[in-house]
């Protein structure tokens, strides 16, 4: 599965949701309508919320008011989420390109053309930016010029977004494997085979790589060797990316649940049922877990117990992953909007 895999699957699976719990719109601060599905996770920098839309545009919106500051049109739909480094925004498009844009104006600085759609979200480390592509490759590019430094070939499309630590790039592939790649040379250090495609992006903590697989498992792998430390089996595809806070891993599953797992052992601490598939990746801020669901809600859960604190209702599924900044939670929806919602601690 390659171009548009995430959106197509979301549309196919949307039917069959159970009734969502009561939700509030009173926490809404503002919303910005793009006119296209928003799967991109918002990034927040310099007072702006930056995100892509399936209307093919990338937006910079005032984080306080929701007013448009700039927009940039790509040549195809945008699933990728932005990475911001200094005054530069990096984001991919299904037009097979990775763009570097000026943070203040949205003006294009450079464009790198891969051989397949760029649904993966870039990661910046030092003077390099790393990103996957549907052409089965992981690329390392000069962050200032966009010049290719190296590429690494996997067996299938790379929708997973790279994470970089200690000179190593970690990323999953639709070939079912998780890779550790030397960040400077682009050579394979190790690989670990799961039982399904890997759309999930890794989380790095405690010397481990935490990542989901479409084989329904969440894995913890040794960062140095790739050896499996533990796995936790859910009831559905795990394309959600884990989030680690303290000694707990939080992750969603297509079995409609959000899980909290012991980071050292993988033992379940709690489980929260939503009304539909959870593709969104959780984030944690001040003891609250924020996560979207295909049941069209953004949930705020107590990180220690999984108790629902509140739920915010969008008009369509919430596959975007939330970002918390400045007392607000920012998240996109397939209803075309990006929402700013008052966070639990504000």
Image (spheres, helix red, strand yellow):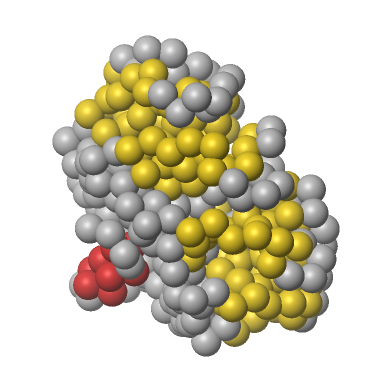
Q: Horizontal and vertical percent for residue 240?
A: 39, 49
Q: Work out whether residue 63 or residue 312 is closer to the camera in this orientation and state it.
A: 63
In the rendered image of this protein, does residue 318 appear above or below residue 274? Answer: below
Figure label count: 0
Q: Quadrant of residue 294?
A: bottom left
At a point 78% along the width and 77% down the height, the residue shown is 69
In the rendered image of this protein, does residue 122 appear above or below residue 76? Answer: above
Q: Work out whether residue 150 or residue 103 is closer to the camera in this orientation and state it.
A: 150
Q: Is residue 3 among the parts visible in the rendering?
A: yes
- Left or right: 281 as drawn, with respect to 108: left
At a point 59% along the width and 78% down the height, the residue shown is 73
Q: Horizontal and vertical percent for residue 200?
A: 37, 45
- Left or right: 29 as drawn, with respect to 104: left
Question: Which image quadrant: the C terminus?
Answer: bottom right
Q: Horizontal and vertical percent for residue 117?
A: 39, 61
At a point 57% along the width and 22% down the height, the residue shown is 167
Q: Horizontal and vertical percent for residue 44?
A: 71, 57
- Left or right: 57 as drawn, with respect to 126: left
Q: Work out whether residue 53 or residue 95 is closer to the camera in this orientation and state it.
A: 95
Q: Is residue 267 among the parts visible in the rendering?
A: no
Q: Quadrant of residue 142?
A: top right
In the rendered image of this protein, does residue 194 appear above or below residue 87? Answer: above
Q: Work out whether residue 195 or residue 240 is closer to the camera in this orientation and state it.
A: 195
- Left or right: 11 as drawn, with respect to 71: left
At a point 38% along the width and 36% down the height, the residue shown is 152
Question: Which image quadrant: the N terminus?
Answer: bottom left
């Amino acid at each position: 599965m390659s171009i548009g895999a995430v959106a197509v699957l979301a549309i196919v699976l949307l039917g069959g949701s159970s009734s969502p719990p009561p939700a509030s719109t009173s926490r809404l601060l503002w919303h910005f309508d793009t006119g296209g599905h928003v799967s991109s996770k918002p990034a927040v920098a310099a007072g702006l919320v930056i995100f892509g839309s399936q209307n093919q545009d990338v937006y910079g919106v005032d984080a306080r008011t929701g007013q448009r500051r700039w927009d940039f049109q790509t040549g195809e739909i945008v699933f990728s989420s932005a990475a911001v480094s200094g005054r530069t925004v990096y984001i991919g498009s299904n037009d097979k390109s990775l763009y570097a844009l000026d943070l203040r104006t949205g003006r294009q600085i450079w464009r790198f053309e891969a051989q397949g759609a760029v649904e993966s979200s870039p990661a910046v480390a030092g003077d390099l930016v790393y990103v996957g592509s549907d052409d089965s490759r992981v690329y390392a590019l000069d962050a200032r010029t966009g010049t290719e430094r190296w590429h690494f070939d996997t067996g299938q499309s790379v929708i997973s977004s790279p994470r970089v630590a200690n000179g190593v790039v970690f990323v999953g592939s639709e070939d079912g494997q998780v890779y550790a790649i030397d960040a400077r040379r682009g050579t394979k250090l190790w690989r670990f085979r799961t039982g399904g495609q890997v759309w999930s992006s890794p989380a790095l903590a405690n010397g481990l790589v935490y990542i989901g697989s479409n084989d329904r498992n969440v894995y913890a792998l040794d960062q140095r060797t790739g050896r499996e430390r533990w796995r936790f089996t859910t009831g559905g595809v795990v394309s959600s990316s884990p989030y680690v806070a303290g000694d707990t891993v939080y992750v969603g599953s297509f079995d409609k649940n959000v899980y909290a797992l012991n980071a050292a052992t993988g033992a379940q601490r709690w489980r929260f049922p939503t009304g539909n598939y959870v593709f969104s990746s959780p984030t944690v801020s001040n003891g609250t877990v924020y996560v979207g669901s295909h049941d069209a809600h953004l949930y705020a859960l107590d990180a220690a117990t999984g108790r629902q604190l509140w739920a915010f209702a969008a008009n369509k599924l919430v596959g975007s992953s939330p970002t918390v900044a400045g007392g607000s939670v920012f998240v996109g929806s397939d209803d075309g909007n990006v929402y700013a919602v008052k966070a639990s601690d504000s």
